[in-house]
Amino acid sequence: MKLIRNIIITLASLILSVNIASAGEKWDMALAYGAGNFHSANATEFAKNVSEKSGGKLTIVTHPGGSLYKGGEIFRAVRTGQAQIGERFMSALGKEDPLLEVDSQPFLATTYGAAMRLYKASKPEIVKGLDSKGLVFLYAVPWPAQGLYSKKEINSVADLKGLKFRAYNSATIRIAELTGMAPTKIEAAEISQAFSTGAVESMITSPTTGKNKKIWENGVGYFYDIAAWFPKNMVIVNKDAWNKLDAATQKLVMSEAAKAEKKGWDLSKKGNKNDKKALADAGMKVGKVNSALKKHFEDVGATMSKEWAERAGSRGQAVLAAFN
Ligand code: PCA
C-alpha cells in the first residue's frame, strides 16, 4: 500500500513539475495608447511574433489604452516588476534621466533623418541609464512631427498669450511658460475630455494624436505644422523578468524588437503625411505658422537647448557632440 502511495505521489509531483517547466514565461505588456494607434498596433504585432516563434517559452499579452497601467504609471510598473514589459513616452521621464528628454528639444532634429541620428547618438547612454535602474531597453519609435493645435486662429505670439495649454512633458510646459500660455500636464487618454470641458484650448502634439482623438469634434479647428521635434516611445523590460529567459529566447526578443523598430519608423513616416491629410479632410485648417511665430518658437528652442545642456551635463555634451 505504502509503495503504491509513494509511486502515486512521485508521479503526481513529476507531472506537476513538467507542467511548470513547459508553461513558459508570460509577460503582460502595458501600453498607454489606444489599440488603433500605430505604436500599439506595432507592439501587438511584436508581441504576437515573439509568442509564436518562442515555441511556448514566452507569451506576451498586450494591454492597450492604459487598461493595465496608465501612461504615467508604466515606467514605475515595469521597474518594479508589476508589469514585465511596457511602452512609455520617453521625454516624460526627464526626472529619471535628462537624456530621455533630448528628443523633445525644439529644432534640434526636425527631419526623420536627423531624428534617427539623434536617436543613434543618444541610445548608448540612455540604454546604460535604464540598465542601472534594472531595465532592459528593446526599441524606440518616434511620433510624427509635433504641431500646434488651437481652438482659435493663431497669427501672432500675442494670440497665444494666456491660452490654456495641454502639455505632455517638461519640455512642452517650458514652451508654454516661455510663450505666456498656461500649461497643464494631461496624458493623451484625457485629451478629448480636457478640450470638450474647456479645461484647455491648445496643445502641441502629432497629427496622429489629433486624428486618433477626432480632435475636431472638440472644437479644435486649427493645426499649425511647426515640425520642430520627433519625440519617441520606448519599450522596456524588467531585468528580473528578462533574466528568466534562456539565451535563445532573449535573442529572439531582441531580433523581433529590431524588426518592430524598423516597422514603427516606417509607420510613423506614413502617419506624418496621411494624418495631416486626415485632419484637413475632417475640416480642420492645416497650415504652417507664419514667420514671426516660427522665429518665436526657434528662440524658445534655443533657450531650452541651453537649459537642457546644463541639466544633462557631460553626458548630454557627449550626445550632442556625437549628433553634430
Ligand atoms: N502624442 C502623444 C505624445 C506625442 C504625440 O504625438 C501625446 O500627445 O501625448
Image (cartoon, rainbow, N blue to C red):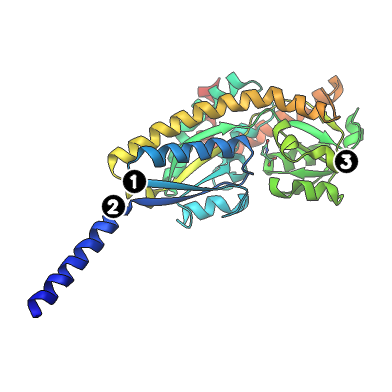
Determine which quarter of the picture holds residue 274. top right
Q: What residue type is labelled 1?
A: Gly
Q: Badge 3 local density, few (<14 within 10 Å), some, or many (20+)?
A: some
Instruction: Pick the residue in front: 208 or 240.
Output: 208
Q: Where is residue 141 in the image (x, y as percent from the top left)?
A: 56, 32
Q: From the viewer's perspective, is 95 left or right of 23?
A: right
The residue at which mark 1 appears reads as: 56
> What type is the residue that disc 2 sits on?
Ser
Q: Position of residue 65 (x, y in %)?
A: 62, 48
Q: Whole-Å distance between the Cαs marked 2 and 3?
A: 54 Å
Q: Residue 219 carries which label?
A: 3
* Amino acid under disc 3: Gly
Residue 23, x across and y down, in percent: 32, 54
Residue at 54 percent across and 22 percent down: it is: 117
Quarter of the render that holds ligand 1: top right
Q: Which residue is drawn at 40% across and 52% down?
A: 26
Q: Name the residue under label 2.
A: 22
What residue do we see at 44% from left, 30% from top?
258
